[in-house]
Image: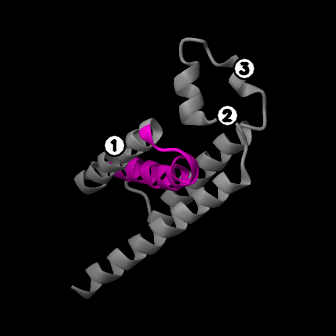
Amino acid sequence: MIQFNLNYFFLFLILLLTEIIIAKYATGFIRHTFGDYLCVILLYALIKSFVKLSNLKTAIFVLLIAYAIEFLQLTNLQSFYPNKYAKVLRLILGTSFSIGDLIAYTLGIITTLVIENKLSGDAKKN
């Protein structure tokens, strides 16, 4: 079950760097929508870096995490963030619920599954 995969880890690092740049310098659509789209791909790559699960199980798990965090934004959770970590937690966990975020997460996972299926299909042909 636990197995390190360098390819996924390298992808995770590239996506993490991209997300940091987006968070620091981007605004509007790039930050709020494309960042969410990439976020689920980043989380997928992180999990696949260390755990050997099927692509579908990993995708569903990631989507459940993303949806859970988004729906937690409907609560008053952010008022309980410790002051010391409030800025970082708001950046990571968000501050307001958005249907658009749910759509971005879903599209990110669909893209991931399409690419994974394409790559595994190409690997079977070779």
Was residue 22 drawn as part of the magenta stretch in this picture?
Answer: no
* Percent coordinates x, y for residue 49 in the rendering: 33, 49
Task: Please state which of residues 40 and 100 is positioned toward the viewer in this rendering.
Answer: 100
**Amino acid carrying mark 2 in the image:** Thr
- Residue furthest out toward the bottom: 125
**In which quadrant will I find the C terminus?**
bottom left
Q: Earlier in the sequence, mark 1 or mark 3?
A: 1
Q: Earlier in the sequence, mark 1 or mark 2?
A: 1
Boundaries of the magenta span = 25-49
Q: Residue at x 54, y 68 (%)?
A: 110
Mark 1 crowd level (few <14, some 14–19, many ≥20, 10 Å Cα): few
| Relative to 103, residue 2 above or below | above
Which residue is under mark 2?
95
Label the magenta part by its dominant secondary structure.
Answer: helix
* Percent coordinates x, y for residue 79 in the rendering: 72, 20
The answer to whether residue 3 shows anywhere in this view is: no
**Amino acid carrying mark 3 in the image:** Ser
Classify mark 2: helix, strand or loop: loop
* Percent coordinates x, y for residue 71 in the rendering: 73, 43
What's the distance in space between the residues labelled 1 and 2, CA to CA?
A: 22 Å
Classify mark 1: helix, strand or loop: helix
**In terms of image quadrants, where is residue 86?**
top right
Task: Please state which of residues 63 and 50 is positioned toward the viewer in this rendering.
Answer: 63
The numbered mark at residue 17 is 1
Was residue 41 drawn as part of the magenta stretch in this picture?
Answer: yes
Q: Residue at x 46, y 74 (%)?
A: 114
Mark 2 crowd level (few <14, some 14–19, many ≥20, 10 Å Cα): some
- Residue furthest out toward the right: 75
What's the distance in space between the residues labelled 3 and 2, CA to CA?
A: 10 Å
Task: Please state which of residues 109 and 60 is positioned toward the viewer in this rendering.
Answer: 109
Which residue is under mark 3?
79
Q: Residue at x 64, y 52 (%)?
A: 101
